[in-house]
Image (tube, rainbow, N blue to C red):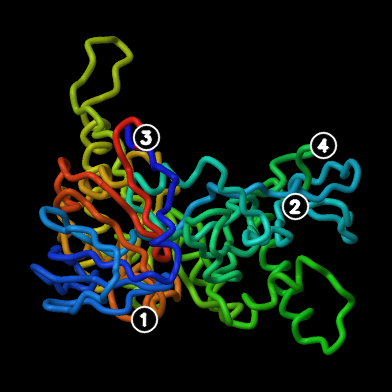
Amino acid sequence: MLLAVFAASGAFAQSTPLAITGVKIEIGDGRVIANGNIVIQNGKIVAVGEGVAIPSGATTIDGKGVVVYPGFIDAYTTEGLKLPSPPTGGTPPSNRDTAPASMWHGNPKGMRPDIVASKCLDLKGKLSDNYAQGITTALLSGGSGSVRGIATVIDYIEEGSILVPSAAGELSFRGGGGGGGAAGGYPGTLFGTVATLRQELADAQYYAAQKSPKKDDGLENLRPLVAGRIPALFAVSTAREISRAARIADEFNLRFIVTGGGEAYRSIDLLKKKNAAVILSPDLGYEPSVKVEDAPDATPQEVLDERHATWVEKTHNAKALSEAGIPIAFSTGGSGLGDFLANVRKTIGAGLPREAALKALTSDSAKILGISDRVGTIEVGKLANLVIMTGDFADEKSQVSSVLVEGKKFDLKKGGKK
C-alpha cells in the first residue's frame, strides 16, 4: 500500500526554484520530451524542455529512470464533501404518484440546489489515497437527489485549493421522493422526478430573469447554470437517459456533459450532434461467466451469452467514444479509488489507445472542466501539478513515486514511512 508522506519541503513551497532534471516528460497532449528539464517557481512551471537552464541555487531532483506526467484529473467524484442535511419541513402528505394543486412547500422532492460543493469541502484523510493514484485535481459534486447543486474543481492540497468555485450544475433523473410518508412523498416515479426537475429549472430561469427577486438561496445557486455560464453535468447511464438529458438540455438551453455514461457508445450520433463530452468510470466490472451451472433452475445458456455480449460491448465504450471524436475524461465515481489506475489500464487493454487514455487523464479532462489554462499539460505558466512515476503509466508495474501540487512535492513510499 502506498501512503503519502505529508512533509512538503520548505524549499519547494517557497520562492526557491525547483528543477527536475534529465527526465522523460510527457506533456499531456501527445508530445514527449525524451530527456528534458522542468523548472518550477512559486507554484508554477517557469521553464520546460531540452537543454533548459537550471537557475542558480535551485533545488534539484534527478529525473533519471522516471517519467513525469501532468497531474491526473478526477473529472467527477462525490468524495471529500460534508453535505448539509436535506431540507425538511414536517411530515408531507402521501403523494407518491401525483402532485396536489398546491405543492406542500416542505417537500424536498429530491431537489438539492442548496448544495454548493466549494462550501462543503472535507478532505481529511483523502489526500494520500488520491496521490497514490497520481490524482492532483478533481471535480467534486454532491451526487444527491435529482437537482444536485453546484460542483467545484479543486487541487488536492491542504484543505483544498479551489480552482473553479462554480464549475457545473449536476442533474439526474434519480433521487426523487421514493414513496409516501415522511421518508418519501412526491415524486415517487420517474415521471414525477422529471416533472419536478423541469419545474426547478423553470423556476430558476424565472428567478434569474427578475430584476429584484425575493431571495432564494437554491435558485440563486442555479443562476449560473440556467444563464449558460456553467455546463449541466447529467449523471446518466443508459442510452434512454442520455436521450432524455439531451431533451432537457435543449429545452432549457443548457450546455451538456454526461457523467456515468455506461451506454454512451449507443448514443454516439446524439452526443456528436450536441458536442457533448462524456466523463466515464474506467471500471469495466467483472466479466460474467458463460458456463451453465448444473442445477435445475440454472440460468439458460442464451441468457448467459447475452449478458457476456453486453459486457463486452460496454468494455469498448471508451474506445468507441474516442474513435468517434467525442471528448472523454475519467472519474473515480462508481469505482474504488484504490483501483483507479489499474482500471484505466484495463480500459487500455480493452482497446482505448494509450495516448487517448493519457489525454483523458490530463489535457482532455482539463478542457472538459474548463481549466486547461491552468492544468492538464506541462507547459510554462501552468500550475506545477505533476506526477512522477517509476515507468509508463500504462504499465501495471509502474508506480507513483511523488506528486507535486502547485509546486509542493509529496513523496510516496511503501508503508508511508519517510
What element does badge 1 sit on?
A: loop
What amino acid is found at the position of numbered circle 1 in the picture? Gly
Inspect the image, locate mark 2, and give the three-letter code of the amino acid beneath it.
Lys
**Image-based side of 117 in relation to 403, left or right:** right
Give the residue type that dot 4 points to.
Answer: Gly
Q: Is residue 37 left or right of residue 379?
A: left
Q: Residue at x 62, y 64 (%)?
A: 150
Tag 1 residue: 381
Q: In the displayed structure, would residue 113 be above or below residue 97?
A: below
**First-in-chain label (4 vs 3):** 4
Q: Earlier in the sequence, mark 2 or mark 1?
A: 2
Identified at 67% across, 67% down, the residue is 198
Name the one closer to the observer, 251 or 127. 127
User: In which quadrant will I find the N terminus?
Assistant: top left
Q: Is residue 270 visible to the viewer in this orientation of the structure? A: no
Front-lying residue, 31 or 314 = 31
The residue that disc 3 covers is: 416
- Provide the secondary structure element on which disc 4 rests: loop
Q: Are marks 4 and 3 in contact (CB under 8 Å)?
A: no
Q: Is residue 171 left or right of residue 215?
A: left
